[in-house]
Amino acid sequence: MMQKRTNPGHVGAREIYEALRDQIMALVYGTDGLLPSSRALASEMGVARSTVTVAYEQLAAEGFIETRHGARPRVARAVVGRGRTRTSSRPPARKVRLSAFGERLRQDPPRWTEPPRRLVANFRYGELASSDFPVLAWKRAVTTAMAHRPERLAYDDPCGSLRLRTALQAYLWRSRSIRCEVDQIVVVNGSQQGLDICARLLLDDGDRFVMEDPGYQMARHTFAATGAETVPVPVDADGLQTAQLDGIEARLAYVTPSHQYPLGGVMPIGRRHQLLAWARKNDAHVIEDDYDSEYRYDTKPIPPLHALEGSDNVIYLGTVSKTLSPTLRIGYLVMPTGLRSLFAAAKQIMDRHTPLIEQQALAAMLESGTYESHVRRARRRNAERQQALLDALRRRFGDRIRIEGTAAGLHVVAWFDGLPQKREDALIQAARARGVGIYPVSALFAGARPARKTVGLVMGYSALEVAQIERGCKLLAQAVAELD
């Protein structure tokens, strides 16, 4: 929509015509895009309707729009194709002077690409099946939250709704044996904002932080954006190799001990105590990302670091992105008591607080037990999906494949023995040509890759139905056979 002018007497038909023409050619309205009616645009611009009519008549005469009596003007189809060729006429981009933070992001930006459409099976991790979302329960919770809205509309506690934090306190005790005070909990816009707050408050330019290798790259990008240096520490079947922390000085360690991302190891209790001892010795904080703790299949939950003795410097990070939806952007931090006010201040500066209606709705689901009932259903469905994936992979590849990380979570890692890592790109392209989306482990390494130089894939299954999983594995097998 064109911007309303404060001095309407200077807006003429020619100016409106030129502005709309440029917007049409810039694809603002897209194919078959509808323009405002002459009456609506005249009211928006503060001009006579006849002025807009003259502009529309000129656009129609030149073939930019199509008009029909009683209908809004529509962008002509032929114009859209021409509009894409006009980019060369744009002036060169001005060189922007950035902060040190901005320069670091420009040199090492996180990679995000829109998920490809029309795939037979997309084994991308982090997505959930829309059919798993508890639509009716969420609608009821939101309706209840709206019905009990406050008497006045005002900013809320930056730490989050007291009702939600109280519900989370009880839930964490029931599900993860975490004992904490309500004031230790800060509600954030997804785990990513929690990581960002930790990075800003605990790291400076030139500091060092420990990362699992391979590990969660968005965490690494977040910490590195402060100017801090990554210290990659390798992982094995038991998670972070804590023995290799000896001699490493760092301000922070980021770990996923309950289900290492991506390889799936569960850190045993001995290593957990070693990690906490290292943190105390270095006066460092440990960020414990318990990103998918609700999904356990063939192992009993191990108490999180935060529940162990000597965990005063552990920051626990949780989220509902893997249980409800990543679109909700609700996460939470459980932190040492001494940091609570500082984190609250940082949260207030960033965005005041997380949207309140969603917080109240989640609190209602936690209080009623609806949330945990949903989690149990989602766990059963994802256990079925995982088993279907394991069966299909073993049936298609036999002893040519090794699978890790099956004890928990929403993904596994499949290593294709006999397929050298240098064929990784070719395999991705061959699979994509057959309608299968696959994603390599190699992209998650910050340091040197291990000696095992075979193709490894991170295979998420939580957004797929069983039939899609089986069909996807069949097509993947065809892609692998093409490379043999």
Image (spheres, rainbow, N blue to C red):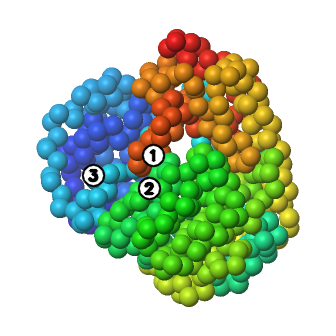
Q: Earlier in the sequence, mark 3 or mark 1?
A: 3
Whole-angstrom CA distance, mark 2 to mark 1, is 8 Å
Residue name at image x 27 percent, y 35 percent: 25
| Type of amino acid under label 2 | Pro
Q: Nearer the viewer, residue 436 or 355?
A: 436
**In the image: residue 61, left or right of residue 136:** left
Most foreground residue, 337 or 311: 311
Residue 445's tag is: 1
Residue at (24, 28) in percent of width and height: 85
Mark 1 Cα shell of 10 Å, populated few (<14), some (14-19), many (≥20)? some
Asked if residue 139 can be seen in this view, the reply is no
Which mark, residue 232? 2
Q: Nearer the viewer, residue 452 or 405?
A: 452
Dots 2, 1 in contact, CB < 8 A:
yes
| Secondary structure type for disc 2 | strand
Residue type marked 1: Phe
Instruction: Read off the residue under disc 3.
Output: 107
Q: Which residue sits at x=81%, y=56%?
A: 300
Q: Nearer the viewer, mark 2 or mark 1?
A: 2
Q: Is residue 265 visible?
A: yes
Tag of residue 355: none
Q: Is residue 347 above or below residue 138?
A: below
Give the label, 3 or 1, closer to the camera. 1
Question: How far across and down, in percent of the image, does residue 350 sit?
Answer: 45, 73
Which amino acid lies under the numbered mark 3 shown in the image of this protein? Gln
Task: Give the vertical position of 408 relative to 56 (above or below).
Answer: below
Q: At numbered mark 3, what does the secondary structure look like: helix, strand or loop?
A: helix
* Residue 469 sits in quarter: top right
